[in-house]
Amino acid sequence: MIVQLPGGYHTPDGRRHREVELTALRGRSEELLCATDRSPAELATAVLADCLMRVGDLTPVDEALTRALTVGDRSYLLLRLREATFGPDVALVAHCPWPDCGEKVDVAFRIPDVPVTEQAGPGPVHAVTLSPEAAPDAADRVRRFRLPTGADQEEFAPLLDVNPAAALRVLLDACLLPDDRGDAQAELTPQARAEIEAAMAAVAGGPALTMRAGCPRCGRRFDIPFDVPDFFFGEVSASADLLLRQVHYLAFHYHWAEAEILDLPQEKRLRYVELLAEEIERMNDAAV
């Protein structure tokens, strides 16, 4: 599958790499996701490094590169990787958030239909002009920033688990670039932080992370947050036992090494299982 990143990877020579070639999840990545205690951000880095064939003309793709991609690009790639591995159709189960209802709501959508916003501006550095209320001193009103990356997600994941507000604060500080005086956080007011966060959200590219749903019982409409890594990794983890059974089945009959089987994409692995099952059934019928 060849896709265009909403943002892109920027190399020191100023080039922006957006075209990405990816392959479906292979058994070795499925095994990694089923048996590891790494954070979702670390898993995303490892899985993308395994499944991306190239980013622009950069190859091979290692974890350092996938760690440097923006959060929006990584979410987009995980969605497309999910499509390449399991197909375009997604089904979710949510509950109506209204306290007097709580009805179970089935949500279905197709990955190609998910809105994707292209990152504003061609470069990795962005700027926002703060309001006089946010920065009384006119010299402090222009703030330069970059967008959060996978490296930021990995670094601040432990703090996010215990104190989300503090994690967002230090993440913003990490993404601010020094001003002409070399100070990125000089006297930032709460209003200034809010305006910078809004500017980051406005320029960031990536897939929509909420789904609109309606309750069949009370008729109310509401938004469902869609956490791409948690959803994708949850799907893979749910098939952990099936993966082991497939490896055992193919190794037992074909005498292939485990590593050879785990290197197969899921679709090809399943096709071998189907062919083998058909052949065994044919031989059993012939023996009767």
Image (cartoon, grey):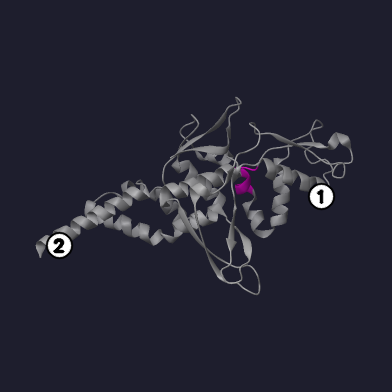
Using residue 55 as the reference point, say whether residue 194 is left or right of it. Answer: right
Q: Which residue is mark 2?
A: 284
Using residue 147 as the reference point, say whether residue 178 is left or right of it. Answer: right
Label 1: element kind? helix
Look at the image and tell me whether residue 166 can be seen.
Answer: yes
Q: Residue furthest top?
A: 13
**Quadrant showing the C terminus:** bottom left
Task: Name the spot of residue 235 as percent of width and height, x first.
Answer: 46, 58
Q: Mark 2: few, some, or many residues within 10 Å (few <14, many ≥20)?
A: few
Identity of the residue drawn at 58% across and 72% down: 217
Label 2: element kind? helix
Q: Which residue is mark 1?
A: 190
Q: Earlier in the sequence, mark 2 or mark 1?
A: 1
Task: Name the spot of residue 84 as percent of width and height, x first.
Answer: 43, 46
Using residue 122 as the reference point, say whether residue 135 is left or right of it. Answer: right
Look at the image and tell me whether residue 173 can be seen.
Answer: no
Give me the C-alpha separation between circle 2 and circle 1: 73 Å
Asked if 153 appears above or below 6 in the picture, the reply is below
Please tell me the numbered disc located at residue 146. none
Q: Amino acid at mark 2?
A: Asn
Q: Residue furthest right?
A: 136
Is 152 a magenta residue?
yes
Task: Name the spot of residue 56 as percent of width and height, x first.
Answer: 50, 31
The residue closer to the viewer here, 73 or 242, is 73
Q: In the image, which residues are magenta?
A: 148-155
